């Protein structure tokens, strides 16, 4: 299948699952988390309340409710503290565990926002590299259509460049 970067609104994508960059409570927040909760409707929050939160680097799945996406995979990325407190590993886990959950649920397509790069402060360049690497590693073993959804043109260019460079390896 494929790894592709696009610029757009993740809440409008018609895929099997969109990934929510959630906080550990899974009860909604700012940024993409708030946008997904608003677009999905109150039922999403209701289901999230039954999940008892989510640890950093882990992932949980819910229905998509009012979203075009059938499911939401909620994952918690690390807060950036300079990179010496296991952040790269935790961020990689967030991508890998989301992909694993998608595969376990027989999903054929998934869309990721940039995890941890907003208020969690993860440097965009480093985060994009981990995202692309984790997705390409997964695609060596499994088939899935993976979208990396960029918020800005610079984010899109960063993803596209990394995909191009790392696919050649």
Image (spheres, helix red, strand yellow):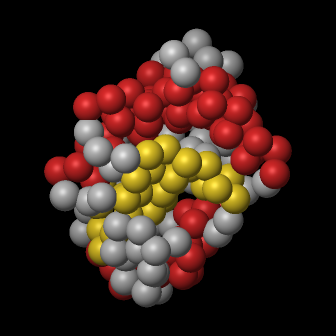
For residue 126, what is the image quadrant? top right
Q: Find the residue positioned furthest to the top.
A: 84
Of the pair 104 and 162, the residue shown nearer to us = 162
**Residue 46 image offset from top left, x and y in percent:** 34, 79
Residue 113 shows in this picture: yes
Of the pair 32 and 143, the residue shown nearer to us = 143
Q: Find the residue positioned furthest to the right.
A: 154
Which residue is painted at 44% across and 46% down in the image? 2
**Residue 141 image offset from top left, x and y in percent:** 26, 31
User: Measured along the vertical axis of the image, is residue 158 above or below residue 49?
Assistant: above
For residue 81, what is the image quadrant? top right
User: Measured along the vertical axis of the image, is residue 118 above or below residue 20?
Assistant: above
Number of callouts: 0
Query: In the image, is 60 to the left or to the right of 40?
Result: left
User: Measured along the vertical axis of the image, is residue 40 above or below residue 90?
Assistant: below
Which residue is painted at 44% across and 36% down in the image? 135
Residue 56 shows in this picture: no
Which residue is painted at 49% across and 44% down in the image? 3
Query: In the image, is 4 to the left or to the right of 63?
Result: right
**Residue 63 image offset from top left, x and y in percent:** 30, 74
**Residue 149 image offset from top left, x and y in percent:** 61, 55
Query: In the image, is 88 to the left or to the right of 2?
Result: right
Which residue is painted at 59% across and 33% down in the image? 163
Query: In the image, is 34 to the left or to the right of 66?
Result: right
């Amino acid at each position: 299948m494929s790894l592709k970067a696009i610029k757009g609104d993740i809440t409008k994508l018609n895929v099997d699952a969109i990934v929510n960059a959630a906080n550990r409570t899974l009860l909604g927040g700012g940024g993409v988390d708030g946008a997904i909760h608003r677009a999905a409707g109150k039922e999403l929050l209701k289901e999230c309340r039954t999940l008892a939160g989510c640890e950093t680097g882990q992932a949980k799945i819910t229905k998509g409710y009012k979203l075009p996406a059938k499911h939401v995979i909620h994952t918690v990325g690390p807060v950036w503290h300079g990179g010496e407190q296991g952040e790269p590993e935790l961020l990689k886990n967030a991508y890998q565990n989301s992909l694993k959950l998608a595969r376990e649920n027989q999903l054929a397509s998934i869309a990721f926002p940039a995890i941890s790069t907003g208020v969690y402060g993860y440097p965009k360049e480093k985060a994009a590299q981990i995202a692309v690497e984790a997705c390409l590693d997964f695609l060596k073993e499994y088939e899935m259509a993976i979208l990396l959804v960029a918020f800005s043109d610079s984010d899109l260019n960063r993803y596209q460049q990394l995909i191009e460079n790392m696919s050649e390896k």
